[in-house]
Image (cartoon, rainbow, N blue to C red):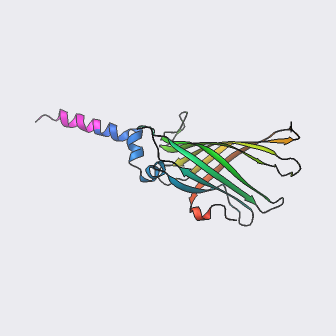
Amino acid sequence: MNKLPHILSSVVLIAAMSSPAAQAGSNDTAKHFMQGGTFCFSQGESIPGGKIKTIKMVVSKAVGGSPNKVAHVDALMFGWQATFPVRSFFDEVTGAATIAPPNDLLPGELQVQIALTGTSYGTDGDTSKPGVWTVDYAATLSTTDLSGRITGVTVFNPIKNGILGTSAKYAVDDALKPISCEEFGLH
């Protein structure tokens, strides 16, 4: 009995199952995310009566064929701080998501990678100096439970009477945890 065809077919099957497309397809949570829907997350550490940040992502069904289908993502980011000065914001952001291995040789398994960018009007705490916030985020989520991180940069540019003031730049590096969308924006 010749075992070579059986061994070769086993090697081909193992290689196919190890491909990023097969791993992504075998994971129900990531697959569900890429099929589209509304997903909500807490961002960073919420402090009762203090600071709360949440994100609602509306994901369109992924298109583009395998591997690495692409899903369009529109998101609303909400933040509220009860401590002085009391502040709140909504940032509208948009972007794309795919399932891929970590970038630039970072260690880890396949992940849901999401790029989000947006602009909103507001202040940096001084209501006499309104302006524009520009936000750029990279979110990475676990394919098994959608927990992860959001990392990025926010820039505030005060604008008064058509004159640009001094910009302020802030880093963002927070944990993301799935929550019920009924919890989005609660404070």
Q: Can you tell which quarter of the image residue 44 is in? A: bottom right
Could you tell me residue 83's position as x and y percent? 80, 62
Classify residue 2 as left or right of residue 115.
Answer: left
Assign the N terminus to one quadrant of the image.
top left
Is 75 left or right of 110, judged from the image as shown?
A: right
Residue 136: x and y in percent read 67, 41
60 vs 159, left or right, is left
Residue 53 vs 108, above or below: the answer is below
Residue 114 located left or right of residue 135: left
Residue drawn at point x = 49 percent, y = 39 percent: 101
Relative to 21, residue 82 above or below: below
103 drawn magenta: no
Magenta: main secondary structure equals helix
Range of residues picked out in magenta: 1-12
Q: Give the image location of residue 126, x and y in percent.
A: 86, 51
- Residue at 29% from the left image edge and 39% from the top image edge: 13
Q: Position of residue 164 (x, y in %)?
A: 85, 37
Task: Give the farthest residue toward the front.
Answer: 161
Residue 167 in the image: above or below residue 80: above
